[in-house]
Amino acid sequence: MCDAAKTGDWHGVEAGFRELTDPVLHQIAIGLAGRLLDRAVAEEAAAADPTSALAGTLWAWRLVEDGWEIRTGAWGNEVSAEQWKGFRAHLRRAEQILIQVTARHPDYTSAWTERLHTARGLGLGQAEARRRYEKAMRAVPHFFPAQQVMIQQLCPKWGGSYDAMHSFADECAEASPPGSVNGAVVALAHIEHLLLVIRDESAGAGVAYLKRVNVQEDLRWAAEHSVLNPAFQPAPGWVAAHSAFAMAFSMGDNQPAAAKHYEALLAGGNLADETPWKYFDDQVAEFVSLRDHAFKKGARP
């Protein structure tokens, strides 16, 4: 599928996606194909077959991605009026496409997940975001990619609150089967909390937040319920889950706990997921530095 996307072979992309039966893997592939597929090919595929859920969702994904390139990842008060205008214009186009996709394919979780992105960017509110999230959950219970997006939606920086964000994360973890990846949303929520404390106070205050006994206990429980549970088996999303726990424990200076997750990523093929590391200017260098520090101070398990 990736090779087909690189060469602009749309039929090859479709064939590759037909082999993906796991919804989480399908969602991961949307992002991979969206990055590799030429913009014109994605647009042409969607125009050629307006009934295709895959073509419409990939084109919408690209529009959202292009919108974020205009907006950038800066804090909201640092984004210019012109950037906001371009960002929202792209998201409105994506939203119109996704409305048609979900109308024709109401159980297509990838489209509902992308509609969570557009809901947040267009400021449609918490109630509408929750409605879209429930649509995804109805189609695929415990759908991890949608839960990851909802953590962002429930952040204070997007109109949510710390209580709402952490309550949601805890609910996702508690409701999920032992050994599933969903417990990682707890780590993602604490990472988002850390970043906001750093923004509003200082880096030291952020680290102090993650070092709190109750926060470390929350992270420990979530990890033991999910990727450190005896029932755990590697499944789509496991790299993102271990990456989130590794970063949360590292930033909270719990090196022995962090080392367990870095070791799992190393044993699995020297892997990492960009999701929690995207906040660093040099993601690879920061990941390697924190991993080496965890192995040195926490000892490899």
Image (tube, rainbow, N blue to C red):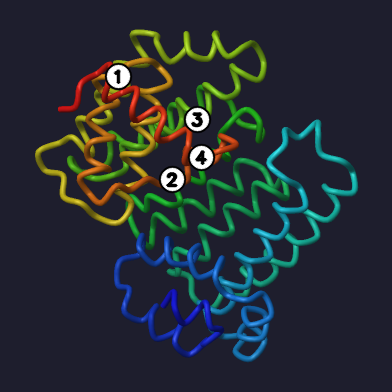
Q: CA distance from mark 4 to mark 2?
A: 23 Å
Q: Left of 233 or right of it: where is 113? A: right
**Depth check: 184 or 40 in front?**
40
Which residue bears the numbered disc 4?
Answer: 283
Q: Label 3: few (<14), some or many (≥20) within 10 Å?
A: many
- Disc 1 or 3, which lies upstream in sequence? 3
| Front: mark 2 or 1 | 1
Q: Quadrant of the N terminus?
A: bottom left
Residue beneath disc 2 = 147
State the image coordinates of residue 299 (x, y, percent, origin top left).
20, 21
Q: Residue at (41%, 47%) from the top-left corner?
A: 273
Q: List x then y, in percent, for residue 169.
A: 40, 33
Q: Disc number at residue 255? A: 1
Label whose residue precedes the other's in the sequence (1 or 4): 1
Q: Which amino acid type is shown beneath numbered disc 3?
A: Met
Q: Residues within 10 Å of mark 4 (few under 14, many from 20)?
A: some
